[in-house]
Image (spheres, grey):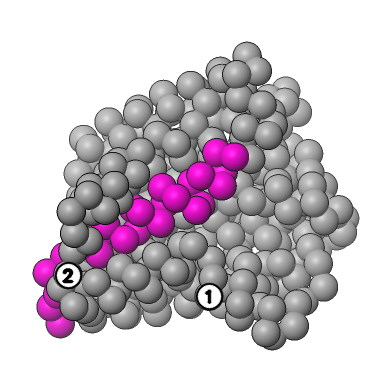
Amino acid sequence: MNLDGLYRMQGMLFSLMILGASLKKKGIITDEGKRVIADLVIFVTLPCSIIESFEVELSMDILKSSAQALLVSCMVQVACYILNMVLYPGVGEEKKKVLKYATMASNAGILGNPVAEGIFGSMGLFYASFYLIPQRTAMWSLGMTYFTKAPDRKTLIKKICTHPCIVSVFIGFVLMLLQMQIPGFLGDTVHSLNKANTAVSMIFVGTVLAEADMKTMITPLSCYYAAVRLLLIPALVWIGCLLFHIDTLVMGISVVLAAMPAASTTAILAAKYGGDEVFATKCVVFTTLLSMVSAPVWCMVLQR
């Protein structure tokens, strides 16, 4: 684990967020532009990053560790489902929708991937791609039921299987099994888009930050949620990995990704389906800012 690399990564990520926030404040990035950037990340740059992360030499150790990452992530989703049943009694329905979704869905896909790669190298991004499969499956299936009625099974399966990040995992996995690389200029294109992913992702997070009212962000409920998202969940993952002797690299990646802030989709879905959009935005922004401190702390814990 490279802590120096983490601090440099944190500084770079923070600078990119400030840039995104400034561009949004100045009107250079509009609300429509913000949605376009989000689509660019989800449909283009992030899938390219995932595909390129699978360009590794295949071995049984890698397959075993990948299976561990999947298993740990599945258990995290089960734990979050249970936590959602007990953690938020007495909270109003609109806020409870937000809290339940944001407890289950972190921003690991956008924020966690560059952090995992920056701390653990290319293998960090590789295992992170496996770790994120259960979360992406849960956030677009069970997670949607927190805001809407549950879709029928056919619609649900289609939505999951056609999600660009899930498709890119399948493509990358096939390329890894066949020990193939994307040839010629196509490979260069994927590589170029992969390099753009971190910058575009963090500029998008910055546009979310620009919309928050800092004066009213800190409330007892937002602090309570931040403790759940940034402390309780990663602590449970860390203890569980230690008890079951999970591979050290997989444990590190799992804990760091579990400590990521609320998913930016929380605010988007709250606005679309009648949740508390303002509260959702505060949760996303508040936990994103706090994660700039909590992520290095968890890395130091993992190094002990």
Residue 276 lies, in percent from the top left, at: 82, 47
Relative to 73, say whether 289 is above or below: above
Q: Residue furthest front?
A: 185
**262 left or right of 53 in image:** right
Viewer-proximal residue, 44 or 232? 44
Is 144 above or below relative to 9? below
Vertical comparison of 114 with 93: above or below: above
Which callout, 1 or 2, points to the residue nearer the camera?
A: 2
Q: Residue at x 69, y 85 (%)?
A: 153
Give me the disc on residue 275.
none
- Going 81% across and 67% down the picture, which residue do you hit? 148
The residue that mark 1 highlights is 161
Q: Main secondary structure of the magenta part?
A: helix
Q: Which of the two residues, 188 or 257, is positioned nearer the viewer here?
A: 188
Could you tell me the amino acid type at mark 1? Answer: Cys
Q: Secondary structure at mark 2?
A: loop
Q: Which residues are magenta?
A: 36-61
Query: Alpha carbon of mark 1 to alpha carbon of mark 2: how far?
Result: 23 Å
Task: Find disc 2 in the rendering and name its residue.
Answer: 180
Q: Is residue 108 visible?
A: no
Is residue 51 inside the magenta stretch?
Answer: yes
Residue 292 position by quadrant? top left
